Image (cartoon, rainbow, N blue to C red):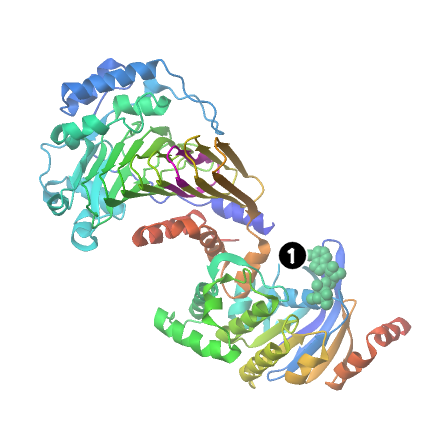
Amino acid sequence: MSKDNQLLEELTSREYEHGWNVALETDSAPKGLNEDIVRFISERKNEPEWMLEWRLKAFRLWSKMTEPKWPNVTYPAINYQDIIYYSAPKQSAKPKNLEDVDPELIKTFEKLGISLTEQKRLTGVAVDAVIDSVSVATTFKEKLGELGIIFCSFSEAVREHPDLIKKYLGSVVPMSDNYFAALNSAVFSDGSFCYIPKGVRCPMELSTYFRINAANTGQFERTLIVAEEGSYVSYLEGCTAPMRDENQLHAAVVEIYAMKDAHVKYSTVQNWYPGDKEGKGGIYNFVTKRALCAGDNSKVSWTQVETGSAITWKYPSCVLKGDNSSGEFYSVAVTNNLQQADTGTKMIHIGKNTKSRIVSKGISAGRSQNSYRGQVHIMKRAEGSRNFSQCDSLLMGDQCGAHTFPYIDVENSTSKVEHEATTSKIGEDQIFYCQQRGIDEESAVALIVNGYAKEVLNQLPMEFAVEAQKLLALTLEGSVG
Amino acid sequence: MLSITNLQAKIGDKQILNGINLEVKPGEVHAIMGPNGSGKSTLASVLAGREEYEITGGEVTYNGKDLLEFSPEDRAREGVFLAFQYPVEIPGVSTINFMKTAVNQIRKYRGQETLDAVSFLGLMKEKMKLVEIDQSLLNRSLNEGFSGGEKKRNEIFQMAMLEPKLSILDETDSGLDIDALKIVSSGVNKLRNSNNATIVVTHYQRLLEYIVPDFVHVLYKGKIVKSGGKELALELEAKGYDWIKDEVAVA
Ligand SMILES: Nc1ncnc2c1ncn2[C@@H]1O[C@H](COP(=O)(O)OP(=O)(O)OP(=O)(O)O)[C@@H](O)[C@H]1O
Ligand SMILES: [Mg+2]
C-alpha cells in the first residue's frame, strides 16, 4: 500500500469526536413549514407583531423561490416539509443566571469543552451559547453593559432593542437575497445580536457556540453585528453537532454592519458532524454571511476553519462601500470521506481605494470534493482599488477533488487584481523527511498541514488557533498500519 | 555498530543495490565515494527506511538489532540520522518547531521527559554555536528559500540537536563555500566520539581533509568494489573512476 493510500485509510477511519446527544426535554413545532409554523415560532418567542410580519413576508418570498443548483455539490433533494423548524429545550422560566440553567445543558457545554462557569471565571471570553434554538445563558453581560456594548440573544434583542433590530435586520442580507437566506428570515430560531457603540473597543472576544441537538431539527440562527463609528470587536463562532443518521439542515445568516473607521473580525471554527464514511448523516450547511463596510476606512475580516458538515455552501463576503474600506477572507477548508464543500468569498468593491485580500487553503482527503468559489467585483467608481487572492489546494490521496472557480470583474482601469493559485500533494518526501527526524507519520501530516494553513491560523485569536490546530490534527488522526 | 551483509534493493523494476557489504564500528568514519548514479543515496535511503525501495536480499544489523524491521521514525529514534543530499522544504513549519517536535518524540521513545520551551531553547542555542547558524534562519519555514549551503548547514544543525549514534551525511559538502565547509566539518568533528560513527558520502577529497575517514569505499553499480584507507580518496581524486571501472570489467 502506498503512503497516500495509507493516509487515505487513516482519514476514513477517524471518528467524530462530538458525536453524542443529551436527552433534553424539548418543546418542538410539528414537522413542516407553512404560515402557521411561522406564527408558531413567532408566538413561542413572544415576538412583537412587526417581527411576525417580517417573517411572513420572508416566508411568502421563499415559497416562490427555488433552491440554487449552481454549487459544485450533489445531495438528495431536501424535503422541506419533513423538517422540524422549531425546537427548544424545555425550561420552566428563563434563567436569571448560570445557577438556574438546566444542569443537563451545562453538561452539554462541558462535553463541548466550554464550561460556562469556567469561562466566566477564567477566560474573559463572553459566551452566548445557543443550543438548538434558544439562547440559554449569556455571560459577561453586565461588564459589557458598562461600555454600552449590547451582546445578547437575538430574541432578547427583538424585545429589548427593537429600534436597532428594525433598522439593521436584513440591511446587509435582504430576505430576498437567496433561497436559504429567505428560509432563515422566515423561521430563524435564535442567534446573537451584538452592538458596539461609537469609539468603543470591545475588551474581550465575543463568542457564540452553536450546536444542533434535537433530531430532525434544522437550525436557523441569525447573527447581527453592528459596529458604530471607530469601534472594534472580535467575534468568535464555534459549531459542533451530535451524530445522527439523517442529514440535518443548517441555514444561518450572519450580517455585519461596519460604520466609518470600524473594525470587525469574525472568526469561525466549524466542526458540524460530517456524516459517516458512507456519507450517511451529517449537516447540510447553507450559510449566508455578509459584511457591509458602509463607512469610510471600515474593515471587516472573515477567518474560517471549516472541518465539518456533509455539505458546506458558504461565501462570507464583504461589500466595500465606504472609501478606503477593506475586506479580508482567510479560510482553511478540510474535506474528507464523502464531504463536499463549495466555499469562498465575494468582495464587492464600490468605494474608492478599497482593498480586499483573499487567502484560501483547501485540503481534500478521502473521496471528498473541495471547491473554492470566489468573486472579485470592482465597480466603475471604485477607482484605485486592489485585490489580492491566493487560493491553494492540498490533496491527500488520489480519490479526492479540488476545484477553483474565480470570477473576476474589473470595471475601471486604475484598479489592480492579483490572483495566485497552487495545487499540491502532501509529498512522500516531506513525510519521510519528518520520519527521519523521529516524527511519526500522523504527527508529520499534522505538522505539514498546520504549516500549510499557517497564514490563516495566524489570523485567529490565540485560544481559537490552538483549538483549530487540534481540530486539523484530529481530522487527520488514525494510526498508520 | 552497523553490519551490512549482501544488501540488495530495487525500485520498480530497477535493481540498484547489488549486494553491499559494510562493517562500521563505533568511533569510525567511513567515506563512500563513487560515480553519479552508482547507488550512494539509495544506500543511505534504504538504511534510513525509505519505503519506496524494496529490499530484495541481505541483512542489516544495527547495535545487534535487525534495522530493516524498524519503521523510519523508530530508526531515527534508535539513533540513525541522515543528512539529506536534497533537504526537503516544509512551508509554514519553522526549523525550531520542527526540531521541537522531533526532539520530544525521540525523548518520549527513549522514556525521557519531554523538554519544556526553556530547556529546548537552551539546547538549541548551544547547538547553534556548533555550526554557527543564525537563529533568523531557524525561525523561517524549514528549508524554504534557503540557499544550497544554508540547507546543508541546517542539516548538520539538526544532527547536532538529535545527537545520533550513526550519522549518514549524503554530499553534505556540495553547495558549501570554503568557509562553510570548514565550519560544518568542525561541527561534525566536535560531535564525534568513541560511541558514534559517521558515514560520509562525497565526491570530493577536500571534505575528507577536514573529516578524516578511517576507511574509504568505492561504490559502483550498486556494489562496493574497492575499499582502502584515506589515501584511496587521493588516488581517486588524481585518477578518476575509469581505472576502477576497468578493474571491475576485468574481474
Ligand atoms: N525513485 C527512483 N526511481 C527510479 N530510479 C531511481 C530512483 N531513485 C534512484 N534511482 C536510480 O538509481 C540509481 C542510483 O541513484 P542514487 O541517487 O542512489 O545515486 P548516487 O550514487 O547517490 O548518485 P549521485 O552521486 O549523483 O548523488 C540512479 O540510476 C537513479 O536514477
Ligand atoms: Mg546521491
Q: Is residue B18 left or right of residue A13?
A: right
Q: Examine the image and state in which quarter residue A304 appears.
A: top left
Q: Which residues are magenta?
A: A327-355
Residue A77 versus residue A420 in the image, above or below: above
Q: Quadrant of residue A85?
A: top left
Residue A460, compared with residue A190, is above or below; it is below
Q: Looking at the picture, does residue B175 appear above or below residue B187?
A: above
Indicate left or right for A457 with A395 as reference.
Answer: left
- Between A2 and A261, the one lying in front of the other is A261
Q: Residue lying furthest right in this view?
A: B250
Are there few (<14), some (14-19), or many (20+) residues within 10 Å of tag 1? Answer: some
Magenta segment includes A158: no
The secondary structure that dominates the magenta segment is strand
Label 1: which secondary element: loop
Mark 1 lies on residue: B52
- Which residue is depicted at the point 28% across and 17% down? A59
Q: What chain does mark 1 sit on? A: B
Name the amino acid, label 1: Glu
Can you give x and y, in whole percent of width and height, for residue A211 in the image?
Answer: 28, 37
Query: Disc 1, ligand 1: is the CB inside 8 Å?
Result: yes
The answer, for residue A90, to whether it is visible in the render is: no
> Residue A64, position in %: x, y?
36, 13
Can you say whether A143 is above or below A72 in the image?
A: below
**Whereabouts is ligand 2, in terms of quadrant?**
bottom right
Residue B114 position in % (x across, y down)? 38, 69
